[in-house]
């Protein structure tokens, strides 16, 4: 079972992001890439592939331990792209306010899991919301420039819990199912 811990923005924030995505999508409708749906928009804190039931309980325990902090404000405020190989393959929205809290919580989950030696350490953590996954061998220059040059309107919300999702790969893409929500102890 593939599992990840995340912060999922409230629906109204995800809908505002979807409005931005819809604009890009309609302008670049002939470009082959996969847009993330409103339901799947989140900030990943830690991803683990192929967990058995015992390791799942360890993962949930690590999320509970990291939720010992108070709820905090998150501001989505910029655009960006990750690259692999020849060019960008993921378009994302970046985090300003709340970045330090997200990094600390991700690190706490990571430390809790890797202490037992059964989990993979993450590479450099960069809190973001993935909005599109680009397919290989496409010409995305105009789309990338448009996305990176956009002055994205700031969106703010209170992160009130850590969501734990199961991710299933299907022929049409991944399917996420929320299996737990661990509230921060100092909820506002």
Image (cartoon, rainbow, N blue to C red):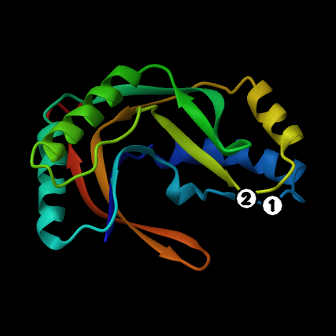
Residue 32: give its label. Answer: 1
User: Viewer-proximal residue, 165 or 114?
Assistant: 114
Do the CB atoms of the residues marked 2 and 1 lie less than 8 Å apart? yes
Dividing the picture into quadrants, the one containing residue 154 is top right
First along the sequence among labels 2 and 1 = 1
Residue 70's disc is: none
Is there any visible trace of residue 116 in the rendered image?
yes
Judging depth in this view, the residue of 28 and 53 nearest the camera is 53
Q: Residues within 10 Å of mark 2 (few under 14, many from 20)?
A: some
Above/below status of 96 relative to 129: above
Return the residue at label 2.
135
Residue at 83% across, 54% down: 138
Depicted 185 relative to depicted 153: above or below:
below
Q: Which residue is drawn at 34% across and 62% down?
A: 49
Q: Distance between the residues labelled 2 and 1?
A: 6 Å
- Residue 29 in the image, given as x and y percentages of width and height: 87, 57
Q: Which secondary structure, mark 1? A: loop
Q: Is residue 8 left or right of residue 133?
A: left
Image location of residue 79, percent across then percent down = 66, 30
């Amino acid at each position: 079972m593939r599992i990840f811990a995340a912060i999922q923005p409230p629906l109204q924030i995800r809908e505002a992001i979807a409005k931005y995505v819809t604009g890009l999508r309609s302008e670049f409708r002939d470009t082959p890439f996969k847009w993330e749906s409103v339901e799947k928009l989140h900030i990943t804190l830690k991803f683990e592939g192929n967990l058995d039931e015992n390791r799942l309980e360890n993962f949930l325990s690590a999320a509970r331990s990291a939720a010992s902090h108070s709820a905090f404000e998150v501001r989505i405020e910029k655009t960006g792209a990750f690259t692999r190989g020849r060019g960008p393959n993921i378009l994302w929205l970046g985090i300003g306010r709340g970045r330090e809290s997200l990094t600390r919580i991700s690190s706490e989950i990571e430390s809790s899991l890797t202490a037992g030696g059964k989990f993979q350490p993450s590479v450099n953590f960069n809190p973001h919301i993935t909005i599109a996954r680009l397919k290989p061998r496409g010409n995305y220059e105009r789309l990338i420039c448009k996305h990176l040059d956009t002055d994205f309107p700031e969106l703010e919300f209170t992160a009130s819990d850590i969501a734990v999702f199961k991710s299933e790969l299907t022929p049409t893409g991944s399917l996420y199912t929320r299996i737990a929500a661990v509230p921060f102890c100092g909820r506002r």
